[in-house]
Image (cartoon, coloured by chain):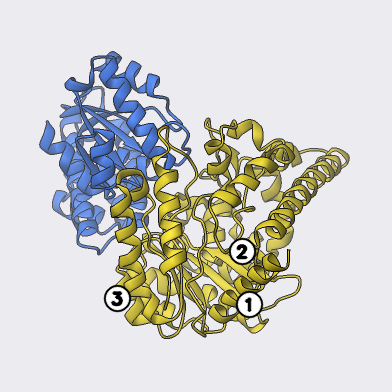
Amino acid sequence: MTDIKELQNEREQLFRDLFSGKAPKRVPVTNPATLEFAIQYYGEDLAEAQWDIARCEPVFDKFCQEFPTDTSPVGSLRLPAFYQILGSKAIVMGSGGFMQHPEVMGLMPEEYDEFIAAPYDFIIDTVLPRLYTELDAEPSKKAMVLAKAVKAFSDDWATLGAIRDRTNAKYGMVAPVVSLTEAPFDFMADFLRSFKGISSDIRRYPEKVVAACEAVLPLMIKKGKLPNPNILGFSFIPLHMAPYMREKDFAKFYWPTFKTLVEELAVMGQKVQLFVEHDWMRYLDYLYELPENTIMRFEYGDPKVVADKLGKKHVLSGFYPVTLLQTGDKAQCIDKAKELLDILAPTGRYWFQADKSIISTDSDGKVADNLRAVLEYVYTNGTY
Amino acid sequence: MLDLQALTQAVGDLDEEVVVSMLEEFVASDPSGDEAYKVVGACQQGMAIVGDLFEKNEYFVGDLIFAGELLTQAIDILKPVLGGEESQKVGKVVIGTVEGDLHDIGKNIFGSMIEAAGFEVYDLGIDVTAAAFVDKVKEVKPQIVGMSGVLTLALDAMKATVDALNEAGVRDGVRVIIGGNPVNEDACKHIGADAFTTNAAEGVKICQGWV
């Protein structure tokens, strides 16, 4: 047990160092495969298992044991009970059992002014009943639905949290405290106006879009704040719309409120981890401006250029292409990890995570074999 | 008759105000169906400009989406004067987001661009099973099947769909193109598709080369 505790302390120290700009003892490793992968890999039905998360404990235990990494892979599921009780349209289960976010619209273009005047009230009164249809009901029924949903949510997460605590105690993994928030423009796109809607709005009602982003900024800051901000916790912000915009639109609509969001969270004494989705190579100079040691997990781009431009200021991560685990052989998969280590570790600010999450398994187990080999390689050879 | 070149340019510039006012003026002049089809052609050429600017990195996906909106709006304005005459279609394409995946933005962009390029589009929607692709291919006999997906699991579903087309004996009659965030050359080979792209405008060009 003492050994495990020591291992856990050592792992925590890796992140303490990494997040405060010091090169850790070795490159910390996070598993790109998610619980959805684990459930399927160990032969459970994904759709069913997510309804009864307690029964997955043996699966998650085996997953932690057979794929050792510094951080716990237990977490980050969108468990379906909560969404189903609410009649969610914003997060729904696909036929394979994977929960996902389809294109939705919670705000109509003619409602911008009302929304801007009081965004929180508008979300409660109008947006939630549209996106969560069971809340489109009489107050008494609405209260009951909400109570049931919150109960399901807290029960499921208490179960998952307890499993995580037990597996961490057993395998010495660490689990940084994470909150989730969005860039104001992404929030407007993802839940209020849709990808399609916002892409038209910036041409049709540009000033209203700017005002709406400013109006939701305080909500996004509040959503991202950790209960006890500290160096080992971070606010996770998955970035979405910027790569799909012209730079002049990005500079006007996306960047100002996003930058303020990250700055405000950093001032509270917590870290911010960005999932830099799609290709942000056009925007590296902007990213440079964010507070020191912002964690950036890249999906695409040239790691050399990113290391040169951002490696002295920010924590870099991502880039490892998980599709290679599916299409490549073991040697190719390891070569890729080596290549990224050679480029990114010299910055002293590298954290091994992949470009995407692995959410499904293949029939011949190739992905799992390659993944195990890559994790082991980085774990053993990941020096700065 | 309106200035077709100016209309093409306005569509290319994504200048909604100018496009709408030109088209409304044109419709008010009680034009013939023939004239109306020339105007549709001018709009389609405007979409080709949009595609070029996209490839030059002057426009991005958000601009393509707005272009699709603008084209739909243009056709809606023109509908009353288009009459029943159908323009000649250059080919048929069956598209869909593959099984297990609910993301359709990329598919919709590709769908509206390839429709603007004169193809007849059969859109099967999202979370489309391999069997549904096979059935539609048997029914409409398209030249092209386009599969889309955002999640990495989409690659497995794309492979399963190509396998199903093979088993049904219809694979050789079609060209298969895959698109979306996780596709690349290796995935394309692994899946057994004929082409891949993460760029809707390029996808349209590939399809145009096939018919």
Camera sees residue A97? yes
Colour in which the image shows chain A: yellow
Q: Chain of mark 3?
A: A
Q: Is residue A25 above or below residue A244?
A: below
Image quarter where the C terminus of chain A lies is bottom left
Task: Name the residue type under label 2.
Answer: Thr
Task: Name the residue type under label 3.
Answer: Val
Could you tell me which secondary element the residue under label 2 belongs to?
loop
Number of marks in the rendered image: 3
**Viewer-nearest of labels 2 and 3?**
3
Tell which chain the image draws in blue.
Answer: B
Q: Nearer the viewer, residue B201 or A334?
A: A334
Q: Rounded to the nearest whole Å, what is the CA distance between mark 3 and mark 1?
A: 27 Å
Report if the CB atoms under discs 2 and 1 are less than 8 Å apart. Answer: yes
Could you tell me which secondary element the residue under label 1 belongs to?
helix
Residue A346 coordinates in the image, percent (x, y): 37, 80
Residue B181 coordinates in the image, percent (x, y): 36, 49
Q: Earlier in the sequence, mark 2 or mark 3?
A: 2
> Mark 3 — residue?
A305
